[in-house]
Structures are given as C-alpha cells and as structure tokens.
Amino acid sequence: MTSQMIIAIIVFIIVMALVASEKIHRGTAALLGAVILLITGIMSFNEAMAQIDFNTIGVLVGMMLFVGVAKGSGLFEYIAIRAAKISQGDPWRVTVYFAIITAVFSAFLGSVTTVLLVGPMTYLICKMLDINPIPLFLLEILASNIGGTATLIGDPPNIMIGSATGLDFNDFILNDGPVVVIILVAVILYFRILYYRTMKARPENIRALQELDAREAIKDPSLFRKSIIMIIVIILGFMFHGILNIESSVVALAGAGIMLVISGIDLDEAVGEIEWSTIGFFLGLFIVVGGLAVTGVLNILAEWLVNTTNGSKVIGILLVLWISAFVSAILDNVPYAATMIPVLLAMQANGVDVSALWWALSLGTCLGGNGTLIGASSNVVLSQISKRQGYTITFIHYLKVCFPLMIITVIIATVYCLVRYA
C-alpha cells in the first residue's frame, strides 16, 4: 500500500469521525478533508473537480430553487392539509401514506428530488398535529432509497449500471421491482412496532385540522397554478430525460429558471432558499471519496472480489450484495458503483456469468445507502430540512434506528437474489 493510499484512508476516516461526532458542521468537515487532499498533493485540482458529480449538484440546486419559489404560492400547505384530511388526522396513517408516496415518487423522479418536495409537506402536517416529525423523516429517507432502487432512473447507481450494460427501464422494474415492494412493506411494519404507540395526536388538534379549508392555504392563485403546471413538466422531464438525451440536472435547473421567470420572484430572494451548507458537504464528500478512488484503494477491494468469487454465482451474489451494502453505507454509492462496474465487465469478458451480479450490485448500493446518515444524497438533504425546522437528526440516532433496518432489507434482498438467480 502506497503512502498516498494511506493518507487518503486517514483523511477519509477523520472526516467520517468528525461527521459522526458532530463536533463541527459536516460541511466543514468534508471541505476540510478535500483541502487536505489537495494540499498534500494526493489529488490535483483537476482530478478533484473530476470526482464531483455536478449532475447531482445541479439537481440539488435546481430543485431547491424551484421549491423555494413554489412554496410562496401556498402549494405545499395546500397538499399538506389535503393529505392530513384524507388520513383523518391519524399520525400513523399520515406516516404510511407519505412513505408510499415517497417510494413511488422516488422511483420516477429520483430520491433527492422527491425528498425536496415531500420534506416540507411532512413538516407542515406534523406542525398542524403537534407531533415530532423525526420518525416520519426517517421513514421517508428509507422509503426514498428503497423506491429509487426499483427503476433505471430512481438512483444514480442504476443509471450507471443501465448505461454500462444496456439494461433498460423494464429490466429494472421486473428484476428490482418485486423485492422493493416486499422490502417497503417490511420497513413500514418495523416502524409500526417502533413508533406506533408514541405517535399520537391530541383530539383537539385532529379536529382543528379537519376543520381547515385547504383552499385558504393558497397565498397566490396564479403562482399556485403555475407551480402545478411546472411540477408536471419537471416530472415528465425527469421521466423522459434519457430519451431526450439531457441530464437530470438540466431538467431541474431549467424548471427552476422557468419558475423564476414566470413568478417574477427576485433572484437574490430565491437563492437564499438554497441549502448552501448541504451543497458544500456534497462537494467536499465527493472529493474525499474520490481520493480513495484516485489512489486505487477502491480498486484493491475490486480485485479482491474478482479473486475471491472464482466464478461461483452464489459467492458472487453474497459478496457483491453485502460488500456493496456496507461500503455504500459509509461511502457515496456513485464512486463505488463507478469502480465496481468495470470489474464486473472484466469478469464478463473473461467468460464469467455476471447477469445476477448486476442486480446484486444495484440492490446492495441502493439499499446500503440507508445504513448511515451520509450513505445517500436524500439522507443528507432530508436531515438538513429537518434541522432547519428545529429537529436535528443526529448521526448516532439515525444509526441506531436505520442501520438494523438496512441489515434486514439486505437479508431480504439476499434471499430474493439467491432464490431467483442462483
């Protein structure tokens, strides 16, 4: 192992420890790690920039801008009141409904886009019912990553796998879709056991909520109508961006730009709605994780996998699925998937049947993202939304609740893969 590898590993461990301890802001920790890698010469500036997934950054910025403009219409308050009234104000029904909505939307819009839209609505409902929104946010984080696993466009690793292999939208639905449904049901049942007894609202809050008129929440009828139209346009853009041959970030930024023009909102005011600390965290994290990729640390893991599987489909499924899950829980799953895809292609070129391993990689990377608060983009985004409203989801609290669930979901995925493919 070279000195550069050792430095990259040490920097990564220190950054992760700082994020977990919450001694300093996670964005500060990630950016500090990135600066150290640049100062020590582990990465050049150009190499560091190449590690940043600007498509993800573009989606984040675009959707934050869009949400910031659209919320001035009262759209989210309207949807929140309607959803709460349909659920008759029952906190558990609200939790289940929003978990299902989050999973379905994540499959077609992407998990990050979904939590940017669902998060504010969830908080408004919880505020009306005077209940703690953290359990709902935690379940929505899990549901976003689980739902995103089901389709080609739901999560970045799936997009990368589809691009490298030629697997299409229907392939992902048919192969990942069935187990995603089973896993989502299991996670909801787990949360019922964990939180059902404590998830109660006072009768007077429920009655007061049911008496509300959702139409009164509309602050700007013209902007309200424009926001609905633009949401439909953006959804269609995300669904067909592959056919249109444009990046998802272009869809998000174009949607935000159009909203700024037709709403007449001042740009400075709209820019203030962007969670710059979240953007800074992602920029730093991409570079820190990229240090492991550039120095060859991730390649060592990949080579070990090739030697260990030795052509066995069962061993291959187990190793790819579980290693992907654990690595994706602590690393961003995009650079990990980018490292593993060439490895599987190399195995395929040598005559190894890797058809089942693509689904093990997809399930492992996507479900593994639920393991820690930094395991996937949607985790960080929704936790920041929660923090901004005064409800901090700590790294340790998330770990205690969601890491065991990640293990359960990967066990279910393992059984599914072995029964179907082995």
Image: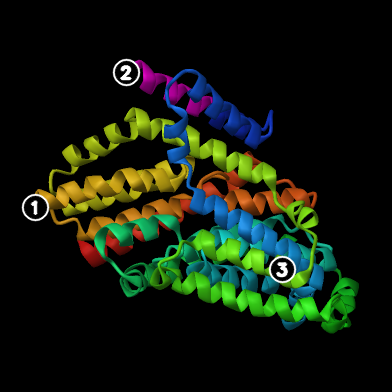
Residue 370 vs 183, above or below: the answer is above
Residue named by callout 1: 351
Residue named by callout 3: 261
Residue name at image x 33 percent, y 51 percent: 321
- Between disc 1 and disc 3, the foreground one is 3
- In the drawing, does residue 141 fall left or right of residue 353? right
Q: Position of residue 299 (x, y in %)?
A: 29, 35
- In the drawing, does residue 264 fall left or right of residue 4? right
Residue 339 vs 159, above or below: the answer is above
Distance from disc 3 to disc 2, alpha carbons, whole Å, reads 53 Å
Q: Position of residue 316 (x, y in %)?
A: 22, 49
Q: How many marks?
A: 3
Q: Position of residue 309 (x, y in %)?
A: 18, 44
State which tag comes first along the sequence, 2 or 1. 2
Q: Position of residue 243 (x, y in %)?
A: 39, 73
Q: In the displayed orientation, state which residue is furthest to the left.
A: 351
Question: Which class describes the residues within 10 Å of circle 3: few (<14), some (14-19), or many (20+)?
Answer: few
Q: Magenta span covers which residues?
A: 3-14
Q: Nearer the viewer, residue 225 or 185?
A: 225
- Between disc 3 and disc 2, the foreground one is 3
Question: Which class describes the residues within 10 Å of circle 2: few (<14), some (14-19), or many (20+)?
Answer: few
- Residue 412 is marked as none
Residue named by callout 2: 2
Distance from disc 1 to disc 3, alpha carbons, whole Å, reads 55 Å
Circle 2 — which element? loop
- In the drawing, does residue 106 fall left or right of residue 210? left
Residue name at image x 48 percent, y 29 percent: 12
- In the drawing, does residue 263 fall left or right of residue 43? right
Question: Which class describes the residues within 10 Å of circle 1: few (<14), some (14-19), or many (20+)?
Answer: few
